[in-house]
Each structure stands twice: as C-alpha cells, then as structure tokens.
C-alpha cells in the first residue's frame, strides 16, 4: 500500500515537472515582454513582471504593422481550415458510402500525398502559383492548402465507426445521401471536426517558408514573418519588444484551442462520440 502511494506521488511530481518544463518558455517570454532592456540583461536575471508592458507592446504593434499581419494570418488560417474541413468531409463521405471505379487507386493516391510535405514540392508549387498569377495574393496562400490527406484519412476512420444500421434506417425513412450527411453523420462527428480545426488552424498559422516565398509586399506578410522582421528591426536586441510581438502572435491559436479544447481532447477517441 505504501509502495503504491509512493508511486502515485512520484508520478504526480514528474507530471508537475513536465508541465513546468513545457510552460517555462511561454512564462519567460511573458515576463521579458514586460521588462526594459536594463531589466532583461540584469545579472542575476530578473524573473518577475515589470511595468514596461505598454511601451513594449505598442512598439511591437507599430514597428512592423503587426495588426495587418495578424489579420492576414487569421483570414488565411480560417479560410484554409474551412476549405480543408469541407473537402475532407466530402471526400471521406464519398470513400465510405459510395462505390465507384478507381476508388482504391484514388485512396492510395491521397495517402501517398502524406509522404510529400510542402517543403518537398515547394519549388513546383511556386511555379504553378506563379503561372496562375497568384503571387502576393490571398489565393496563392489559400488554395494550395485546401486539400488535406490527413483530414480525409481521419474522417474516413471516423465514418467507418458509425453503425451501418444508421444508413439503412435513413434509407428506409427516405433520407437522401446529403440529408443523411448533414443531419446524422456530421452531428456524430463534432469532436473529430473540432480536433481537425485546431490542428489545421495551428498548422497554417505557423507556416513561414511558403508565405515568405509567395508574398512580396509588407501588406501581405503573415505574423511569422512579422516576428522575424521585428527581430531584424530591433538591431539592439530589444528583447522586451520582440517577446511582446511573440506573445501577441500566439493569442489567436491559443483562443482557438481554448474554445475547442474539449473537442480536441475527445476528437481522437473514435468510440466516445454518441
């Protein structure tokens, strides 16, 4: 009994240490974003909050037009996530509820695309987008990412867990395929949808290389490039301003995760949805 209690206490201590280790970088960024240059480089380091919040955040906001970049990143992430969600749901619905020629081959092709991440095909992708005239436009940052093999595969696995009796009952009641899709299938998959929204939103939000290649003007830049521009602008290593910019860039994905955390946590427990 005593040995079991010691094991439980040890596991709790390790869990607390793991949480502290994960949260420490964010906490340090938040602390530094409130400090002046003198406080940031003080010896020993000052690990308490200071009162330089407003100057640091105001400078970070105005120095690289961070408001415009936040709008760009939010708009692109929302539209891409919505597009991926729609296409993944419809593709998974077709693969799991209809029979057609080449079904297995098409599924194999979709799975193969998982092996070709964007950095591998980025040169060819740039040529295609350039030919369409989408460089430095929202279309060039949005359309190439609408298709999602991960989302399609995830929904295929989820749809396969839905009892076939539901399909038969819907057919007997005269329910058309799209009526079944919207009224029965989607409500059963709300956790999986929420999980995919969180994953795809953060994935698009964190992109750096493709927006750097596909945009030329500052008005089309995204926040990840904005943080880099902020570091270049603060040549004197004003880390209070830089960390203020970093904190502002993580707020939108943090809000998305906050509102969808229950769906995200339950999204991969395929048998838990009722």
Image (cartoon, rainbow, N blue to C red):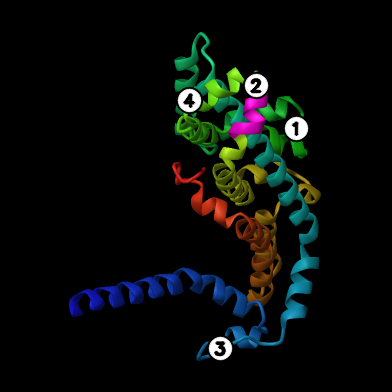
> Percent position (x, y) of residue 198?
59, 50
In space, the residues marked 4 and 2 are separated at their CA atoms by 14 Å
Label 2 or label 1, whichever lies nearer to me, is: 2
Q: Which contiguous range is marked in magenta?
A: 175-185
Asked if labels 3 and 4 touch by Cβ distance under 8 angstroms, the answer is no
Q: Any magenta on residue 79?
A: no
Tell which circle, 4 or 2, labels the residue nearer the N-terminal end: 4
Position of the N terminus, as image quadrant, is bottom left
Tell which circle, 4 or 1, labels the residue nearer the N-terminal end: 1
Circle 3 residue: 46
Q: Main secondary structure of the magenta part?
A: helix
Counting the numbered discs, the total is 4
Q: Label for residue 175?
A: 2
Q: Residue at x 28, y 76 (%)?
A: 10
Circle 1 residue: 134
- For this view, does 49 lie left or right of residue 16? right
Q: Label for residue 164?
A: 4
Tell me: residue 109, above or below residue 61: above
In space, the residues marked 3 and 2 are separated at their CA atoms by 66 Å
Q: Any magenta on residue 180?
A: yes
For residue 189, say whether it is visible: yes
Tell me: residue 36, above or below residue 152: below
Tell me: residue 274, above or below residue 90: below
Label 1 neighbourhood size at 10 Å, few (<14), some (14-19), many (20+)? some
Q: Residue at x 67, y 44 (%)?
A: 211
Tell which circle, 4 or 3, labels the residue nearer the N-terminal end: 3
Tell which circle, 1 or 3, labels the residue nearer the N-terminal end: 3
């Amino acid at each position: 009994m005593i040995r079991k209690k010691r094991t439980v206490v040890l596991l709790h201590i390790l869990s607390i240490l793991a949480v502290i280790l994960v949260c420490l970088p964010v906490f340090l960024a938040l602390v530094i974003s409130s400090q002046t240059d003198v406080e940031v480089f003080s010896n020993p380091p000052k690990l308490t909050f200071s009162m330089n919040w407003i100057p640091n955040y105001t400078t970070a906001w105005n120095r690289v037009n961070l408001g415009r970049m936040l709008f760009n990143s939010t708009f692109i992430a929302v539209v891409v996530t919505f597009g991926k969600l729609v296409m993944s749901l419809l593709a998974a619905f077709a693969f799991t509820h209809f029979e057609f020629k080449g079904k297995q081959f098409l599924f194999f092709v979709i799975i193969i695309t998982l092996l070709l991440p964007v950095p591998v095909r980025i040169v060819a992708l740039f040529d295609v987008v350039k030919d369409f005239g989408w460089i430095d436009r929202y279309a060039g940052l949005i359309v190439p990412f609408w298709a999602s093999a991960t989302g399609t595969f995830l929904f295929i696995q989820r749809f396969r867990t839905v009892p076939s009796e539901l399909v038969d009952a819907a057919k007997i009641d005269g329910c058309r395929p799209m009526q079944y899709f919207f009224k029965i299938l989607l409500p059963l998959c709300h956790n999986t949808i929420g999980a995919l929204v969180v994953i795809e939103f953060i994935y698009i939000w964190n992109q750096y290389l493709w927006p750097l290649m596909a945009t030329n003007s500052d008005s089309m830049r995204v926040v990840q490039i904005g943080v880099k521009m902020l570091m270049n602008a603060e040549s004197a290593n004003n880390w209070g301003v830089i960390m203020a910019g970093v904190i502002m860039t993580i707020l939108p994905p943090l809000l998305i995760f906050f509102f969808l955390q229950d769906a995200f946590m339950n999204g991969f427990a395929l048998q838990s949805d009722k």
